[in-house]
Image (cartoon, grey):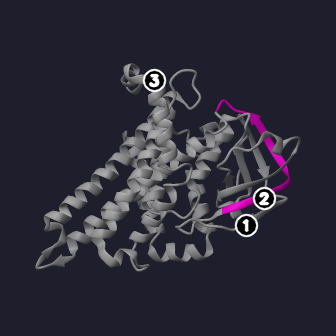
Amino acid sequence: MNEAQTILDDSLSRFFADSIDREYLTRLEEISWDDALWSRCIEQGLGLVLVSETQGGMGGSWLEAFIVARACGRYAVPLPIPEQILAGWLTETAGLAPRAGVAGILPEVIATAAVAGDRATFTAERVPWGRHAEHFIGLTTDSELVVLDRANTKAITEANLAREPRDKISFEATPILARAKVALPASGVRWLGALLRSAQIAGAATACLELSVKYTSEREQFGRALSQFQAIQQQLAELAGAMASVDTIAMAACLALDERGLASAGRDAKFEIASAKCRASEAVEPITRISHQVHGAIGFTYEYDLQFLTRRLWSWRAEFGANGEWGEYLGQVALQEGGDNLWRYLTA
């Protein structure tokens, strides 16, 4: 990261550390939304990281988006900041002006027939914070971006393991506010959502490592700190390795996306994004297992921060595709390129 990106990372750490603690997260699991923190995040432009300065955004790259999403994961931010970042990028990519208000990202492809004319009728599953959205954004099977009003919608409230809202939204002749063709695959939301979830997993993994190192350094057994036992040192080393691999590959995927895009005529960033989400989802198991093993029973309690992170890790690993789905894609690429060309493809 360059100096400006390091400053952004440090600023986000201070901001979220001052705003979010265990009591706050416990309360937000009950009420699911905080207008005050959301307003502060929007005032700082966190949802407009990828929007150009001429449209009122930060004019940042996907690497800046990674930094913000990673910070959201590290501090278990209970708000859809990564989704708002994606919404801003999608609308500007489609040539539309970014809209104010909470954007509901529709994870799955919308059938073109469901958005015929100026009304939409269909049901969307597992919409992040759908009950709080003021408008909804998704891609159709023919790569058209549609922005839908919240009028004529019905929300069935559901949640993931971390008790973050993941709602079923029914659209019944819902007005279409805007639409435009985009140079993206119809599954573009899934690809980009997977990348942002990988960044969040990297952040939560970092926090798990920090908590584990701190706890084992302070907790004593048989007259010395747990961190002085070789078995604990080995576990912490494995945890650090898993965290570093997720962080590195997710960052590399963002750099590839900045460089090559998602729908280039030649080699685009799909392979890197699939690799990032596959590795991130795969690493969740050892990260959570080791973190809880070195903490013992306290890690599961509401009086300790760890479970807020690990429940999010297990939720995010499956969202926008689990490691099996992305691993299958990587295998298909390997078979397509063949043994003679695979290394050339990987290093291109």
Alpha carbon distance from label 3 to label 2: 42 Å
Identify the residue position indicated by label 1 in the image.
Answer: 156
Q: Amino acid at mark 2?
A: Ser
Q: Earlier in the sequence, mark 3 or mark 2?
A: 2
Q: In the rendered view, does 270 fall on the left or right side of 144?
A: left
The local secondary structure at tag 3 comes to helix
Could you say which disc has been placed on residue 337 in the image? 3
Frontmost of labels 3 and 2 is: 3
Range of the magenta residues? 167-184
Alpha carbon distance from label 3 to label 1: 44 Å
Does residue 257 appear in this view? no
- Which image quarter: residue 212? bottom left
Q: Amino acid at mark 3?
A: Glu
Work out whether 152 lies above or below 217: above
- Asked whether disc 3 touches disc 1, contact meaning CB atoms under 8 Å apart, the reply is no
Q: Where residue 139 sits: x, y (%)?
A: 70, 41
Q: Where residue 280 sits: x, y (%)?
A: 42, 49
Q: In the rendered view, does 174 fall on the left or right side of 239?
A: right
Tell me the chief SS of the magenta region. strand
- Which image quarter: residue 22? bottom left
Q: Amino acid at mark 1?
A: Ile
The local secondary structure at tag 2 comes to strand
The local secondary structure at tag 1 comes to strand
Q: In the rendered view, does 7 fall on the left or right side of 94?
A: left
Q: Earlier in the sequence, mark 3 or mark 1?
A: 1
Identify the residue position indicated by label 2 in the image.
Answer: 170
Q: Earlier in the sequence, mark 1 or mark 2?
A: 1
- Asked whether disc 1 touches disc 2, contact meaning CB atoms under 8 Å apart, the reply is yes
Work out whether 35 lies above or below 180: below
Q: Residue at x 76, y 46 (%)?
A: 147
Q: Residue at x 44, y 35 (%)?
A: 255
